[in-house]
């Protein structure tokens, strides 16, 4: 190749190389310019992000510090740094000084910061300074440690941070959580997890567990309405059903905060209170007193059945809860309130009682219908006034009667001569009369001051020293054993030589009556009477002996006289007519004397209670006929008719035939003596209610009224001689049979003697009772 070609080739190569170099330079420049533009764009982004980060940090009032090798530098938030320094009481807002102050504040804070700087361990805590609080959050990034500081001064210093607030909620014993708009929990505290038995919210959500579906619905309702909602819900926690008050509060920025409080005891207390109130109301409805409860607004809150019945108010109207004033107005319209001259003033005074704090004094209302009510007012525990009305009309009447009885009793005791005192079961002196004071010579003031049994005994001991007697008497008064309170009586002698009869008697009300009587004169008189009685008994014995001896001595000659007189009457012609008349007279007199002696002996036996009846069954008709036959001859001699009138169906009577015949003989003899010639003596018997009546009547001259009162007395003179014992013996023998004798007579109209003998009565001589058989 030639030199020119070589030069040309070299030149062409050089030009090509130059062109290539230019092109490469252009390409490199373009690449460099692209990289510069990319770097510029990246730098601009970084600057924008740094400005945004700084702006955001400053927007949230926080200072950002970067710490490298223990040296702190401010990254952003100069104003926040000043706030934090002021909160900690630092004069200068120096980042390093602030970090040193944080480490000096608390050993725990220093430990956490060193762990962050040396090992990159994150930390979060709060430091309280003299003027506020600083919240510290630390994180590590590469070789740098970053601290975000937030300061709060004044009232804002007390606001907790989110972690502290979460720790606070976790410390609550009751469940608390934050719910979403649909009511589902998004954050829960430990109590919520313990209630559903879950380790975390995710585990609970996976199982579909919830504290209470109703509480979740309540949270959703609060979120939708934007209002606070609360309710009491029952849930099973720890195996026991408990009541929780659930409050759902919408939060700023969304979500609902739900708080619960365990109100089981409160709900149980409310339930018990409700039951007690119902039982109390039911009890008040069963008592006789009228009860009304008014609220502090003076409206009727409660009334029992007795209240409506007492005032005659309609239950439907009372159910409308009228006011106290309206009830008073209606009662006044119906004239059921006490009469007063100024009703308005009286009503105002009644309504003013709501302002009184303590219970008012009891009041008495006198109503126009003559009833008396006791009114009790007292403040109600729940406010208002409670009124209780008691109808004490009967109580006052009984009290008046009781007081009158006590006064009558006291007046009666004061009229007694016996010393009387009444002691209660507690030994207190209840009643005593004036004679008690005089008997023991005690002044009234001293007796009133004594009060009880022991005090009274001390006043009586000077007159009666026997303490054993007083102890026994005290047992009758105060011993609670009923057997110990048995009646007690006896006699004792006092120091002034009086003989005192005492007795104790238990009373129905548990009290004991003790009475003392001075029987000194009575005992002296009894001694004299005993001596006289002994003398009279001796005289009676002598009289019986005398009567018996005389009767025996007289019977023998009388028997001789009667025998010889009968012999003379039968001597025939050997004795003249006049002699026979004399003999008959002697016989009649002797017979009469013998009968009189028998009467005297019978009366003496009756008086000595020595006569006994020989009872047997007797046909009444035969008894009457036999009596009429015995007296027929004398009746014919006196020209008097004897008529027997037995009633039908008399049958048998049980008695002593000899004594009944003796009764009829004396009555017939008396009738014959009182009946003139052509007169009639009637012997009759009839059966009455529970008795048999033996009756002897005559048509004689009758018995004067002044004689009738003593007709049955002994030794009343008779017109036909004798000692006058016939009618007295009739009375005694009838009474010995258990009966009695009656007389009916008018002067000039005859007389009727009736012996009433009981059908079932027992004989007075202790023999078998009278009996009547048909």
Image (cartoon, rainbow, N blue to C red):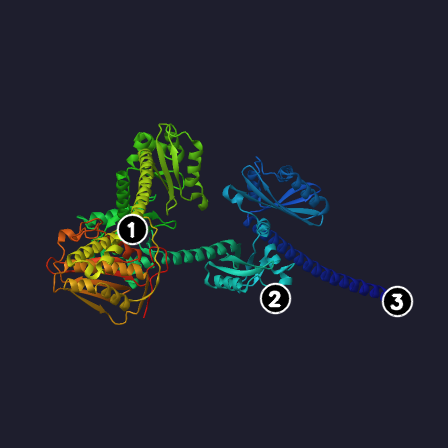
Local crowd size for mark 1, using a 10 Å CA cut-off: few (<14), some (14–19), many (≥20): some
Local crowd size for mark 2, using a 10 Å CA cut-off: few (<14), some (14–19), many (≥20): few
Q: Residue furthest right?
A: 1
Residue 555: mark in rendering: 1
The quadrant of the rendering that contains the C terminus is bottom left
Q: Is residue 753 visible?
A: no
- Measure the C-alpha gap from mark 2 to mark 1: 140 Å
SS state under label 1:
helix
Residue, x 44% and y 55% (percent of image)? 276
Position above or below: 554 against 221? above
Residue 675 location, quadrant:
bottom left
- Measure the C-alpha gap from mark 3 to mark 1: 238 Å
Mark found first going from the N terminus, 2 or 1 = 2
Q: Residue furthest bottom?
A: 648
Q: Nearer the viewer, residue 351 or 699?
A: 699
SS state under label 2:
loop
Mark found first going from the N terminus, 3 or 2 = 3
Asked whether the beta carbons under mark 2 and mark 1 sit within 8 Å of each other, the answer is no
Q: Position of residue 320 (x, y in %)?
A: 30, 61
Residue receiving disc 3: 2
Residue receiving disc 2: 208
The quadrant of the rendering that contains the N terminus is bottom right
Position above or below: 126 against 275? above
Position above or below: 238 against 446? below
Residue 94 location, quadrant:
top right
Q: Position of residue 314 (x, y in %)?
A: 28, 62
Mark found first going from the N terminus, 3 or 1 = 3
**Discs 3/1, front:** 1
- Report whether 534 appears left or right of 259: left
- Report whether 203 appears left or right of 734: right
Q: Nearer the viewer, residue 611 or 719?
A: 719
Asked whether the beta carbons under mark 3 and mark 2 sit within 8 Å of each other, the answer is no
């Amino acid at each position: 190749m030639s030199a020119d070609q070589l030069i040309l080739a070299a030149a062409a190569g050089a030009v090509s190389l130059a062109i290539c170099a230019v092109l490469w330079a252009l390409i490199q420049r373009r690449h460099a310019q692209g990289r510069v533009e990319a770097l510029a764009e990246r730098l601009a982004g970084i600057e924008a992000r740094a400005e945004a980060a700084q702006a955001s940090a400053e927007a949230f009032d926080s200072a950002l510090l970067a710490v490298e090798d223990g040296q702190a530098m401010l990254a952003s938030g100069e104003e926040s740094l000043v706030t934090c320094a002021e909160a900690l009481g630092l004069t200068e807002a120096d980042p390093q000084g602030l970090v040193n102050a944080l480490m000096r504040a608390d050993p725990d804070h220093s430990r956490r910061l060193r762990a962050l700087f040396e090992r990159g361990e994150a930390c979060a805590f709060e430091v309280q300074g003299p003027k506020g609080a600083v919240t510290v959050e630390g994180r590590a990034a590469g070789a740098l440690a970053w601290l975000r500081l937030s300061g709060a001064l004044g009232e804002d210093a007390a606001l907790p941070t989110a972690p502290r607030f979460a720790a606070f909620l976790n410390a609550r014993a009751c469940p608390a959580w934050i719910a979403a708009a649909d009511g589902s929990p998004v954050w829960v505290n430990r109590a919520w997890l313990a209630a559903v038995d879950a380790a975390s919210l995710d585990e609970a959500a996976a199982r579909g567990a919830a504290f209470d579906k109703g509480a979740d619905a309540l949270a959703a309702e609060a979120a939708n309405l934007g209002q606070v909602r609360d309710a009491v819900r029952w849930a099973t926690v720890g195996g026991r059903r408990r009541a929780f008050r659930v409050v759902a509060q919408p939060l700023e920025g969304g979500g609902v905060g739900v708080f619960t409080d365990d109100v089981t005891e409160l709900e149980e207390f409310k339930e018990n209170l409700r039951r007690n109130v119902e039982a109390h109301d039911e009890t008040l409805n069963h008592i006789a007193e009228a009860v009304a409860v008014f609220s502090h607004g003076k409206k009727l809150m409660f009334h029992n059945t007795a209240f409506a019945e007492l005032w005659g108010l309609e239950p439907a109207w009372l159910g409308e809860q009228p006011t106290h004033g309206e009830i008073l107005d209606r009662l006044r319209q119906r004239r059921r309130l006490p009469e007063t001259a100024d009703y308005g003033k009286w009503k105002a005074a009644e309504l003013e009682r709501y302002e009184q704090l303590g219970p008012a004094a009891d009041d008495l209302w006198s109503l126009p219908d003559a009833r008396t009510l006791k009114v009790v007012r007292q403040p109600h525990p729940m406010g208002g006034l409670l009124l209780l009305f008691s109808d004490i009309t009967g109580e006052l009447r009984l009290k008046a009667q009781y007081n009158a009885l006590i006064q009558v009793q006291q007046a009666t005791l004061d009229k007694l001569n016996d010393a009387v005192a009444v002691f209660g079961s507690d030994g207190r002196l209840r009643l005593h009369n004036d004679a008690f004071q005089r008997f023991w010579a005690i002044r009234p003031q001293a007796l009133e001051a004594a009060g009880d049994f022991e005090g009274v005994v001390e006043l009586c001991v000077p007159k009666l020293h026997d303490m054993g007697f007083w102890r026994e008497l005290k047992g009758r008064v105060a011993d609670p054993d009923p057997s110990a309170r048995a009646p007690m009586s006896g006699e004792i002698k006092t120091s002034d030589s009086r003989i005192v009869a005492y007795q104790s008697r238990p009373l129905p009300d548990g009290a004991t009556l003790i009475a003392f009587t001075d029987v000194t004169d009575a005992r002296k008189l009894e001694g004299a009477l005993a001596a006289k009685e002994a003398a009279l008994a001796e005289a009676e014995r002598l009289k019986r002996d005398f009567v018996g001896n005389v009767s025996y001595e007289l019977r023998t000659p009388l028997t001789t006289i009667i025998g010889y007189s009968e012999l003379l009457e039968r001597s025939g012609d050997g004795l003249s007519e006049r002699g026979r008349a004399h003999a008959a007279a002697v016989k009649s007199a002797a017979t009469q004397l013998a009968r009189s002696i028998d009467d005297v002996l019978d009366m003496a036996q009756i008086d000595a209670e020595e006569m006994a009846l020989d009872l047997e069954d007797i046909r009444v008709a035969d008894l009457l006929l036999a009596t009429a036959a015995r007296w027929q001859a004398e009746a014919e001699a006196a020209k008097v008719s004897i008529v027997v009138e037995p009633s039908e169906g008399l049958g048998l009577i049980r008695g002593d035939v000899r004594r009944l015949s003796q009764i009829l003989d004396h009555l017939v003899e008396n009738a014959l003596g009182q009946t003139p010639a052509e007169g009639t003596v009637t012997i009759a018997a009839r059966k009455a209610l529970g008795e048999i009546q033996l009756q002897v009547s005559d048509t004689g001259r009758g018995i004067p009224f002044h004689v009738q009162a003593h007709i049955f007395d002994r030794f009343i003179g008779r017109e036909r001689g004798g000692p006058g014992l016939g009618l007295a013996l009739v009375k005694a023998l009838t009474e010995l049979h258990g009966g009695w004798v009656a007389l009916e007579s008018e002067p000039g109209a005859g007389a009727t003697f009736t012996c009433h003998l009981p059908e079932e009565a027992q004989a007075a001589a202790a023999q078998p009772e009278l009996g009547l058989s048909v």
